[in-house]
Amino acid sequence: MNYTWNKQTIDSVELKSLLVSRGLKVDKDVYRRLGKSYRIYPNALTCNCLLLPDDTICMATDLGFHLSTLSSMFSWDNLKLLKYMNDMTTDFQVVLDGDQPVLLYQKEPVTPIRFLPGTDFYLQKTSSGMPYAGNAVLQGREWVAFQCLWPCEYAQAGYSCQYCFSGGQFESLAKRKKPMPFIPSPQDVREVSDYAAANCHVTSMEITGGSTFDASVEEKHITSYLDALQNSPLMRRKDGEILLFITPPKQTDVLDRYFALGADRIACSIEVWDETLASEIMPGKHRFTGRERHLQALTYIAEKYGSGKAFSNFIIGLEPIESLTQGATYLAERGIIPTASVWMPFGKPVRGSMKPPELDYYRRTKEMLAGLYEKYQLQPPGGSGLNVCIDADIKRWCSQS
């Protein structure tokens, strides 16, 4: 589907990329009138999303709430915020036209939009008292995601990835000698999973944690969660999948155990292919793990379990299209899916900048990945789509015939 944006014709993937990278502002009337019936809440922890007319799912980051949350996370002083204030604005806005929510750009209509049905998910607590909000999110229609189940030790040591909100929080807490967030128990994860499956039409799950210096620590975490999920509704379903985002282990038998315990696909995300940029943007991953270890794990999975079982996320917008293309092609040729998460720069500068790429960058990325998915017959994860990832949308709408 096409839209008019800034006097240009763009498609849904391009519009999603612009929305995710630039954020938006939601009129208070939208929350007041729609918040009880739809998933649009005045809380940055609820991972709001909107639907374009062709059902493309887009992250709906209201910059007002998002920035206040980041200020609390990082304890930034006003001078640090002021330095980037010009970058923390957006020309996208969601308003109501009667009862219909509409996306505007510079006050001009772009398209009517929709929201997903409301849920009590974020009001729940586990039997241990753990609140769902802040520990798990609903993504799109089908997904419950645990985005950082245990703290990143690279970040605590002062080597956080510049683009990572959670890593920035861990690094800030460590510098101030504050305690790290608690680690949800396997029972907590099982209860959230079961509730999401029973009440939110969820069929799939993402399990993610922070990098650890001792690989056995991460393995114990992941194994305990997968053990707790045995015979769970999500494990039994045939129309969904369990994704693991992991630090690549040194021993490949660890990967075998994860698959045996129910993982459907495993990501060891390289995120930035250009190694000079990677050393600056993600110093911990570059210094302590390195690209080669990621490639060894990904290649092992693809060779043993088949094409499409391994994937590696790229943060779209952090490196030139040329190096991104080189990395994505290298992976696709080996049956490893290059996936694409759009960089959300607001509130977390990378290399001293919070300025996202222009439209042409996203267009070229979309066309490049569409060609790779078609040529190598790769199906990215995501079903009907995830909030900030565009790979499933590219496969749905843009793959060449």
Image (cartoon, helix red, strand yellow):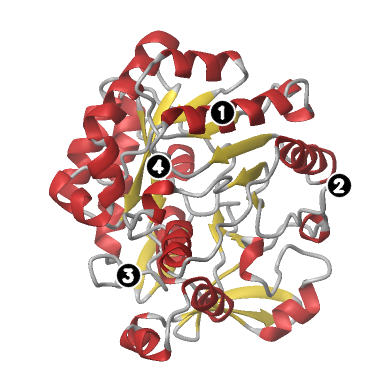
Residue extending furthest toward the front? 177
The nearer-to-camera label among 1 and 2 is 1
Q: Mark 1 points at which residue?
A: 220
Q: In this view, does 130 lie above or below 254?
A: below
Residue 279 image offset from top left, x and y in percent? 19, 50
The CA distance from mark 1 to mark 3 is 33 Å
Measured Cα–Cα span from mark 3 to mark 2: 38 Å
Query: Mark 1 is on which residue type?
Result: Lys
Marks 1 and 2, the one that precedes in the sequence: 2
- Residue drawn at the location 56% of the way across and 23% of the way down: 264
Is residue 309 toward the left or the right of residue 130 in the image? left
Q: Of discs 1 and 3, which sits in the foreground?
A: 1
Q: What amino acid does circle 2 point to? A: Ser
Q: Name the residue under label 2.
A: 127
Q: Name the residue under label 3.
A: 349
Where is mark 4, residue-wise? 398
Cα separation between marks 4 and 2: 44 Å
Q: Seen from this angle, which residue lies furthest top?
A: 304
